[in-house]
Amino acid sequence: MPRKIDINIHEHLNPWIKKSLDLFNNNNYLDQILEIYPFQIAVPTRLNKELSREIMMAHAARDTPKLFSLLKNLTKFPYDDPIWYLLKSVKGCFDNNPRQVQRIADSLYSMTAEEVVVRLESAPKINTQMGPMFTKWLKNRYKSLHADEFMNSDTGIVNLHASEEEAKRFVNDVLKQDLPKRPDLFVKVNSTYIIGEAKWIGQPGGNQEKQVGEVVQFCSKQRGSVIRIGIVDGFPWAIHNLSGRLINNKEAVNIQESPYNIISALLLDEYLGGFL
DNA sequence: AGCCACACCGGATTCGGAAG
DNA sequence: CTTCCGAATCCGGTGTGGCT
């Protein structure tokens, strides 16, 4: 997507966006971000010995019913198959669709028995663990208070400690924000409420642009005196690719050209400090 | 009351096809 | 040939309902 704003003319950028861009492009940003998103080493999770032996036996014997019944009890599957879930969990699908069953069996038999087990033992996808990381960091970083104390607080930075439901009620009933869910950031600086939508965007493509759109939408609907910000990290702050060409992906451009206060989580302290 | 299984939900990536 | 885009999919956490 074409850029409307020259990235080099800083006066045209929102100052917080400019700060975030500098942070990413002129520093060890990805190392620093470990403080907030502490990615762990991706360690494989070993299957119980007896089970893996049974799986390899059934595979070697081409005993499809046995192999399927063993795999049915696991959450992972050796490869991404769009039909597997239906076969294993919807009544009748397995019995009524022998061609699909055979196709999947043949897929499994095209790999070695060891490979089947290795794939089942593959490390969990770290991306699915990132949502809670921001919440956890926030809770440790700032003083966390329950709703009543939070409401009465009028000095310093405090974080609302509440369940998803309770926080959602609070933000909508008390602060009149009309949100479909609890905001990821829900803090109060002195007497100012600040809420934010936080995202990790690791790469362009896929649903990522929808996520970016959500943040921008969120920021655009300022209501009352509650301040809304976006907290975005990862790819949207990138400017040049390896060959030095300007990155023009939607995910990056839509964030970088946004007029709203969208920041890296690493700048949250500095941003909130401005309200003290 | 406490526990556990399970469905739902939010979040990110994969990968094939479209576009340049 | 390379880059861009979006539908489909997977994964783990959270909430919930049934059971003891």
Image (spheres, coloured by chain):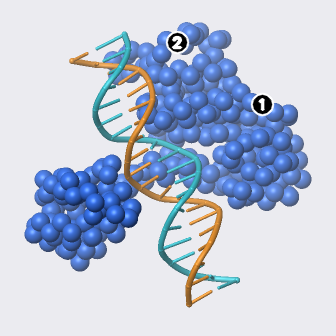
Chain colours: A blue, B cyan, C orange
Residue A257 coordinates in the image, percent (x, y): 60, 18
Q: Tell me the residue that label 2 is attached to.
A: A3
Q: Chain of mark 1?
A: A
Residue A85 coordinates in the image, percent (x, y): 36, 57
Specify the quadrant of the image occupied by residue A195: top right
Among the two numbered marks 1 and 2 on one chain, the one whose residue lies closer to the N terminus: 2
- Marks 1, 2 in one chain: yes
> Position of A160 compared to B13: left or right?
right
Residue A117 coordinates in the image, percent (x, y): 22, 63
The reply to whether discs 1 and 2 touch (Cβ–Cβ < 8 Å) is no
Q: Say which element carries label 1.
A: loop
Residue at the image point whose x is 69% and y is 39% from the top: A196
- The image shows residue A16, relative to residue A245, as above or below, that is below
Residue A39 coordinates in the image, percent (x, y): 45, 50
Residue type at tag 1? Gln
Q: Say which element carries label 2.
A: loop
Residue type at tag 2? Arg
Specify the quadrant of the image occupied by residue A192: top right
Which label number is shown at residue A155?
Answer: none
Residue at the image point whose x is 55% and y is 35% from the top: A211
Quadrant housing the C terminus of chain A: top right
- The image shows residue A53, relative to residue A34, as above or below, that is below
Q: Tell me the residue that label 1 is attached to.
A: A222
Q: Chain of mark 2?
A: A
Q: Is residue A177 visible?
A: yes
Residue at the image point whose x is 27% and y is 70% from the top: A69
- The image shows residue A180, relative to residue A89, as above or below, that is above
Q: How would you rate the neighbour count of disc 1 (Cα within 10 Å): few for under 14, some for 14-19, many for 20 or more?
A: few
State the separation of the CA atoms marked 1 and 2. 25 Å
Q: Closest to the observer: C9 or A248?
A: C9
Q: How would you rate the neighbour count of disc 2 (Cα within 10 Å): few for under 14, some for 14-19, many for 20 or more?
A: some
> Position of A211 compared to A183: left or right?
left
